[in-house]
Amino acid sequence: MLDGGLPAPDGAAGDEDVDLTVLREAARLIGRAESPELAISGILRLLSQMLGLNRARVMLPRIHDPGLTIRYAYGLTDEERERGQYRAGEGVAGRVMRTGQVAVVQDIDQEPLFLGRAVRRRTLPDEIVAYIAVPLMDGGVPMGVLAAHRLRQRPRKIDRDLGTLQTIAVFIVQILKFNALLEERTAHLRDENRQLKDALSSAQPAHGILGESEPLRVALHNALKVADTEVTVLITGESGTGKERFAELLHDQSGRRDGPFLAINCAAIPEQLLESELFGHERGAFTGANAAKKGKIEMADGGTLFLDEIGDMSPDLQTKLLRVLEKRVIQRVGGNRDIPVTVRILAATHKNLQQAVNEGRFRLDLYYRLNVFPLHLPPLRERRGDVRLLTRHFLYRTNREYRRNVVLGEGVLERLESYAWPGNIRQLENILRRAVLMARSDQVSAADVEAILAQESSIEQSVPAPLADGPRATATAPPATITPPPLPAARPYRRVREQDGDMLLGALEEAGGNKARAARALGMTPRQYRYHLDKLGLSKASDS
């Protein structure tokens, strides 16, 4: 029968010394053992050899269900350990696990709950055999069971064996908890190192996320933490910090990687066209709508939609976007039918949305829907050491694109590192392109770079006001009037690339809307510049 309190047969002299010896040796094993397996197995061996608590075993829950399995043992064969599988609440061990109470079977032949599954009765001595099982308690909750056989008729008191087992159970709990914590931390570090290594070696070349500085690593680490989730991410940072690159990274590292990734700049499309671009339209919705057309949200179904410069979206469109996030449906312009969509929304802005909310220019409920996980990208001036890496990357890529073999002269890298970069990575890339195209020889000199930077400074550039959680850095470059250096004699053909759109519009903005000046800044003829705008569909945006 099961019993929680036992009569005490006559004990043997020196039992207390033996118990102390067992506990002392157990403590030494814990300190010396290189693994939980060695420590716990050694302790179970002590119980058998010094106390006669034979075939001791530690039973723990299985991975996928609450049943018990023999995880550690001494004196059991592999076959016996394999047989030691118990459903939740089954047998003596199951009852101990369920109740958290000690169980003592004084005669296993008389106890119906004793299953004899792992150790067959015929393998035990032909006399009365007792069985003791104690719970492994962690904060009042059973996490496993420690059990052992012993001969019933022995001079040593059985309640002394019970007390020793309960103390040993505390030792084993601490071993298991420490090992679980160590494994968790080790696994976390391994996973973190793997993710960072994969991101820095694989994702960066694919998305242009180059850099080794700590601020960039933090941003990359935060992005990878939520990449493979459905959470909405709001990417903040100054213009040119690579917000679209990070959006692509979030998509490619997610379960939606095989779906479409679409990006739209809410500030580059006139308000009256943006609704149709996002939601699509039905046939006849407006003049010229000769056929139904899907919008970007519907086209991104099953994938990711990146909404850049979300802070420039009109209040009416904000309301409609909020409905998409809440209901996961859209209605095309001119339609009244709800179309379900499963799209992950990523948004970005260089503006202070909290200030826009306070001023009534941005909906508070939409802000909270978008800002589930904020991801702030550091400005280039705070990424110490990354200017050199990015410069070499852009120089190599520009040389390949324009079939040049230009190198950087003495002092160029140092001058580029000392610049404040109000336009961030995009500005650095544009300046490197210009420097390669304008180089009079096969070398970009420090004087060439100084002249280009002086041109940049002739347009008053201020570092944008920081976001509420962003860095508090401000800088304004002093205006200057510098005669631009002579243009190169020949302008090589340059194919139209979709990713050049921001560069074309950025140059136009820096030139105050003058397309001829923008073309010169990029080493292009006005005709080439207009052709690129037309091919990319940016002519209207450049005229606004």
Image (cartoon, rainbow, N blue to C red):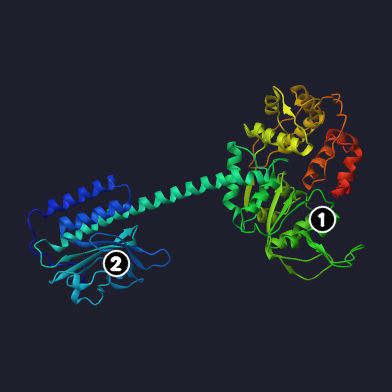
Compared across the picture, whether 64 is left or right of 131 comes to right
Compared across the picture, whether 76 is left or right of 374 comes to left
Mark 2 burial class by Cα count in 10 Å: few <14, some 14-19, many 20+: few
Residue 452 x %, y %: 79, 28
Q: In the drawing, what numbered circle is on residue 274? A: 1
Q: How far apart are the alpha carbons under marks 1 and 2? A: 70 Å
Mark 1 or 2, closer to the camera: 2
Mark 1 burial class by Cα count in 10 Å: few <14, some 14-19, many 20+: many
Residue 351 x %, y %: 73, 44
Residue 309 x %, y %: 75, 48
Q: Is residue 257 above or below residue 482?
A: below
Query: Element at badge 1?
Result: helix
The amino acid sitting under disc 2 is Glu
Please give the name of the residue rendered at 7% of the width and 58% of the height, measured from the top-left corner.
12
- Residue 79 occupies quadrant: bottom left
Please give the name of the residue rendered at 23% of the width and 50% of the height, measured from the top-left corner.
26
Residue 478 seen in render: no
In this orientation, which residue lies closer to the viewer: 15 or 118?
A: 118
Q: Is residue 113 above or below residue 213?
A: below
- Residue 164 occupies quadrant: bottom left
Q: Are marks 1 and 2 in contact (CB under 8 Å)?
A: no
Q: In the drawing, what numbered circle is on residue 79? A: 2
How many tags in the picture? 2
Q: In the drawing, what numbered circle is on residue 251? A: none
In this orientation, which residue lies closer to the viewer: 59 or 77?
A: 77
Compared across the picture, whether 133 is left or right of 373 comes to left
Looking at the image, tell me whether mark 1 or mark 2 is earlier in sequence order.
2
Query: Element at badge 2?
Result: helix
Residue 391 seen in render: yes
Residue 27 x %, y %: 24, 48
Q: Is residue 333 above or below residue 178?
A: below
The amino acid sitting under disc 1 is Leu
